[in-house]
Image (tube, helix red, strand yellow):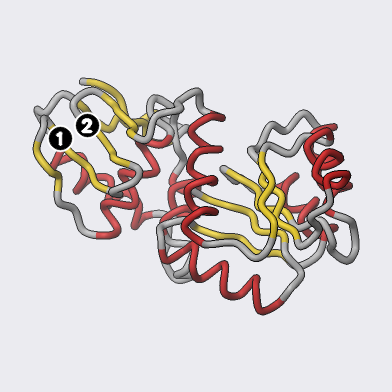
Amino acid sequence: MRALLAEDEQTLGTWLSKALEGVGIQVEWVNNGKLADVSLQNNDHDVLILDLGMPGMDGLEVLKRLRARDQRLPTIILTARDSLNERVMALNAGADDFLAKPFALVELEARLHALVRRARGNEHSRLCCGSLIFDVQKKQFSLCGEILMLSPRKHAVLRVLIQHSGEPMSKQQILDRVFSDDQDVHPEAVEVFVHRVRKRLEGRGVRIVTMRGLGYALEEA
C-alpha cells in the first residue's frame, strides 16, 4: 500500500512516516496543502491521510479539489479538530473516514487497510487469488493451505500484486510501494524479485503474468 500523508506538524509527520513504513505501508509525506494537491494530481497512491489545518491550502480544500477531479482515492481525515460540525463538513466534502488526534497507530493502520479493501470491493480481512491467500491481520501468505515463507522484499512485492489482483502493476508502481525508502534501487530490481516470486508460485494454481507495456499481474493459473 502506498499512502500520501499530508501533515504539517513536523514531529508527528516524521514519526508517522517511519511508523507506517515499519508496518509495510509506503509513505509520501508533504507538509503543505498545495504540495498535497500537486502530488495527488501527479503521483499514484492507494490512500490519503489528510490533516485539515495545513498551510498553503486547507485540507478541506485539498479534499474538495480531489473529488472535483473525480479522483476516488480513499481518504481519512486526521486532525486535532474534533467538533461535530467539522466532521460533518469533511464527510460531506468526500472524506471516507475521520480519526481525531491523538490516536493509536494500530487503529490508523486497521482503518487504512479497511478503506483500501472497501475501495476495491473487498471487505474481508483476507485477500485471495486462486490458491494464494494473504491474511491482512497476520500479514501472512498461505499457498495451497500451507504457510508461504518469503524474504521481506519478496513478501512486499507479492503483497502489492495480490492487493491489485488481476490488475497490471508497472515496475515503477511496484518500486514506489516496495523500495520507496531506498533511492538507489532501479526498476530492474523489480524484475529480479518478480522472477523469484514467480518460481515459488509455479504449478500451484496462481501465477504472475507479464503484460507487455503494462507491467505484472497476479492471476489464477
Q: Which residue is mark 1?
A: 143
Amino acid type, residue under disc 1 in the picture: Leu
Q: Residue at x 45, y 70 (%)?
A: 182
Query: Vertical placement of 193 versus 183: above or below?
Result: above
Q: Quadrant of residue 204?
A: top left
Q: Which of the two labelled residues, at mark 2 and mark 1, occupies the earlier sequence position?
A: 2
Q: Secondary structure at mark 2?
A: strand
- Image quadrant where one finds the C terminus: top left
Q: Residue at x 83, y 38 (%)?
A: 88
Q: 10 Å neighbourhood of mark 1: few (<14), some, or many (≥20)?
A: many
Q: 10 Å neighbourhood of mark 2: few (<14), some, or many (≥20)?
A: many
Query: Vertical placement of 176 versus 90: above or below?
Result: below
Locate residue 113 relative to residue 29 in the image: left or right. Answer: left
Q: Secondary structure at mark 1?
A: strand
What number is the disc on residue 78?
A: none
C-alpha span from label 2 to label 1? 5 Å
Locate residue 215 relative to residue 126 in the image: left or right. Answer: right
Q: Residue at x 84, y 61 (%)?
A: 53
Q: Which residue is mark 2?
A: 132
Q: Residue at x 31, y 49 (%)?
A: 191
